[in-house]
Amino acid sequence: MAERDFLTNYAAGKQEMCIANDTISDSLFQEYGVNRGLRDVNGKGVLTGLTGISKIVSFKEDETGKAVPCDGELWYRGYNVQSLIRSLKEDEFGFEKTAYLLLFGELPDAGELEEFTKVLGESRTLPTNFTRDVIMKAPSKDIMNSMTRSILTLAAYDDHTSDGSIQNNIRQCVQLIAIFPMLAVYGYHAYNHYENDSSMYIHRPDPNLSTAENFLRMLRPDNQYTPLEAQVLDAALILHMEHGGGNNSTFTTRVVTSAGTDTYSAIAAAMSSLKGPKHGGANIKVMQMMNDIRANVKDWEDRDEVRAYLAKMLDGEVFDKKGLIYGMGHAVYSLSDPRERVFKSYVEHLAVAKKRQKDMALYNMIEELAPELIGEKRHIFKGVSPNVDFYSGFVYEMLDIPLELYTPLFAIARIAGWSAHRLEELVGMNKIIRPAYKSVMKEKE
């Protein structure tokens, strides 16, 4: 403890030196034509690669060639994600089918889907005593850290960790897709038992159930869930599986993969990216914001009162005083987020089943009011609309999923996209990613 205090004091004394010597002004970025964060002033990402896995559409050209904002579109391997979800039958789960599509580039036929689902089911196993010796050994409130440690440790149980063949990488990726729900749920139960003094539940997955069903089955003490609950969670997983390749964690996957590292290290790096609050924690901020609104707005049905409180939020007077309405707007989409559009119907059905219509009405009201207020108070370059994270936290809350598992659920979905991009990087690129940085260092004698 004394050593830690010494290091803390030392770091405190050095932070001003770091700030003074590591600050780079906006004027230098402008002078050298460098986009901070690889984003231009309109929020558009700098082109850094090519991919055939997914596509985002937020603007379309008119007859003069001018880019015009349009309703957002998200495509997986040539299929519109909204169409993929709407094509599911009433009792059909789509995560497994969509994971196959992302990994291999084609929708599976009935036989291929049955085989892939069986492989996933049979792969939902951990090495002997892994749960006890690794997951339960050092429980953490940060389940993302717990999962990342488990992923790296799994490399020690794999006799072919460093085999760079495509066949071996497919095996490793499919295995990780299968066991991610186990790493997340078991990590939570260990934390909840040792840190919160609650009962411990370690339920084995059922190889005959879908990913969404198994997650709920392993999480809940009684193993019980309704078909609607599982279908809503399945839809959430599909919508979070992949997002154009330009997000931070997917780019991390590709950068690390290009260096020739193993699958476990690449996915652990992606996990470290996703756990950052600027990336994977958006729905948590939405939930915190909504709790604050409920606590401070007396009448949730009073449109004027809600509007006035949102205005104070934008002015930085209330909530976290950051001047933001969380869940509104997106770095890429302009008029609408296609994921939110298709997900909202699932949210509404679940809200009725859970008798949360009053909360749903409040969300609807904020969805209407927030874009108007943001348009009035901000100089914006594109339209503002709710994104998928505006509703995903509400869904997880209705499913009684603890807050600690919100970002891990994102990872359970996104591991499919990361895996697809890892394989594409290995097959289609085969060249280390090495960006250039302009030095603005001042030489000293």
Image (tube, rainbow, N blue to C red):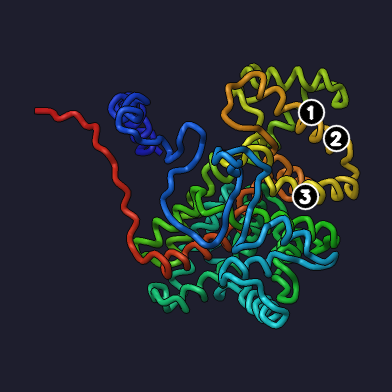
**What is the spatial separation of the Cα atoms under label 2 and label 3, in whole angstroms?**
20 Å
**What is the spatial separation of the Cα atoms under label 2 and label 1, in whole angstroms?**
12 Å
Residues at badges 2 and 3 in contact (C-beta under 8 Å)? no
Please name which of the two marks, 2 or 1, marks the residue nearer to the observer.
2
Left or right of 277? Residue 115 is right
Question: Residue 405, position in %: x, y?
Answer: 65, 51
- Reply above or below: 394 against 431: above
Please name which of the two marks, 2 or 3, marks the residue nearer to the observer.
2
- Reply above or below: 354 against 109: above
Residue holding disc 1: 294
The residue closer to the viewer here, 303 or 88, is 88
**Label 3 element class:** loop
Tell me the kind of residue under disc 1. Answer: Arg
Q: Residue at x 84, y 67 (%)?
A: 91
Question: Residue 74, position in %: x, y?
Answer: 63, 52
Mark 2 or mark 1: which comes first in sequence?
1
Question: Residue 193, position in %: x, y?
Answer: 66, 54
**What is the spatial separation of the Cα atoms under label 1 and label 3, in whole angstroms?**
19 Å
Number of other residues with Cα within 10 Å of mark 2, as a class: few under 14, some 14 to 19, many 20 or more: some
Mark 2 or mark 3: which comes first in sequence?
2
Q: Residue at x 76, y 43 (%)?
A: 394
Tell me the kind of residue under disc 2. Answer: Ala
Residue holding disc 2: 361
Please name which of the two marks, 1 or 3, marks the residue nearer to the observer.
1
Please identify the quadrant where the N terminus is shown. top left
Is residue 23 something that shows in the picture? no
Residues at badges 2 and 1 in contact (C-beta under 8 Å)? no
**Label 1 element class:** helix
Q: Residue at x 47, y 68 (%)?
A: 423
The residue closer to the viewer here, 19 or 224, is 19
Numbered badge on residue 400: 3
